[in-house]
Amino acid sequence: MSQEIISQVSSYLTSNVPVIPISQGAEAVVFTTTIHPYAPSNNNTDESIKYILKYRPPKKYRHPSIDKALTKHRTLSESRILAKLSQISGLHVPKLIACDVYNGCIWIEFLGEELPNGSGFSSLKNYLWMCVLDPYSKMVEDTLVKVGYQIGLLHWNDYCHGDLTTSNVVLQNSGTHWEPYLIDFGLGSASTLVEDKGVDLYVLERAVNSTHSRYAEKYSQWLMQGYKEVYEKQSKKGQNKLRDVLKRFEEVRLRGRKRSMLG
């Protein structure tokens, strides 16, 4: 990560606000901080209390006015989706704390923790790697079914993630089990289209196949088990919608295979 981006964030924030970079994507850089955006003058000495700061840096290859407009639009769009998703009963997403559309910053609830044995941050991806010695355990099954259920809730309420990978699911330890949270809605949208939902499921399947190929078939079954539960609870209407989504998922999968064969 370039020092320039870190300097940009530091200059945007008030003094004495520590930020630690944790990831960088094509659109944004993610930091952690121990300072709440509405109380920057308060000196938080408890390092266990953290917040996420997501920052969209300026893109030099774009015209400045176009870049500002895009940054404002995408930051506002992600913030609105997070705010709406947090109102859906049973759906787990990080809470939106603050949004600065003009500087491309979103402050979000910090989720996750370090996994045992130094396996890294508690994304679903790292969790499945940690469980490689017992990949078909009841705990892994229960966790993946819950992840599928969260995705089902998202789709049933007519929202799509846009980048469903095992890195964009964070697991929170409740003491007796892992509770999944969906994160990073930078490409998220409100959508009633079965095409968008089918693409979401296909992207997730590809992610599981690429990072956990040896166990991908069983993992995908457990994910779909949880996903179907949401729709099957909604009587005939839900079953009809589920049939439409799964049919489109198969069509998207077939198109993806053809593209792979043709290069």
Image: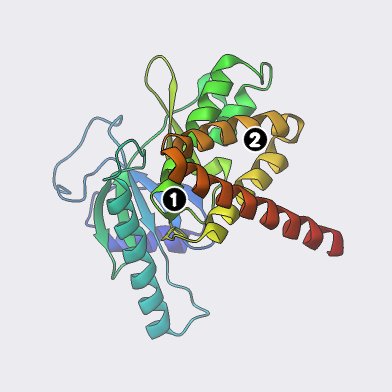
Q: Residue at x 48, y 30 (%)?
A: 146
Three-letter amino acid code of the residue under disc 1: Asp
Q: Quadrant of residue 106?
A: bottom left
Say which element carries label 1. loop
Q: Is disc 2 surrounded by few (<14), some (14 to 19) or many (20+) residues within 10 Å?
A: some
For the residues bearing labels 1 and 2, Cβ distance under 8 angstroms: no
Which residue of the protein is positioned furthest toward the right in this rendering? 261
> Is 167 in front, or is 7?
167
Three-letter amino acid code of the residue under disc 2: Ser
Can residue 6 be seen from the camera position used here? yes
Q: Mark 1 and mark 2: span between their CA atoms?
A: 21 Å
In this view, 178 is above or below 24: above
> Is 50 in front, or is 222?
222
In this view, 159 is above or below 151: below
Q: Position of residue 40 (x, y in %)?
A: 17, 49
> Is 158 in front, or is 170?
158
Reading the image, the residue beneath label 1 is 184
Report the disc number at residue 220: 2
Q: Is disc 1 surrounded by few (<14), some (14 to 19) or many (20+) residues within 10 Å?
A: some
Q: Residue at x 45, y 64 (%)?
A: 4
Tag in front: 1 or 2: 2
Q: Position of residue 77 (x, y in %)?
A: 35, 64
Task: Name the quadrant of the C terminus.
Answer: bottom right
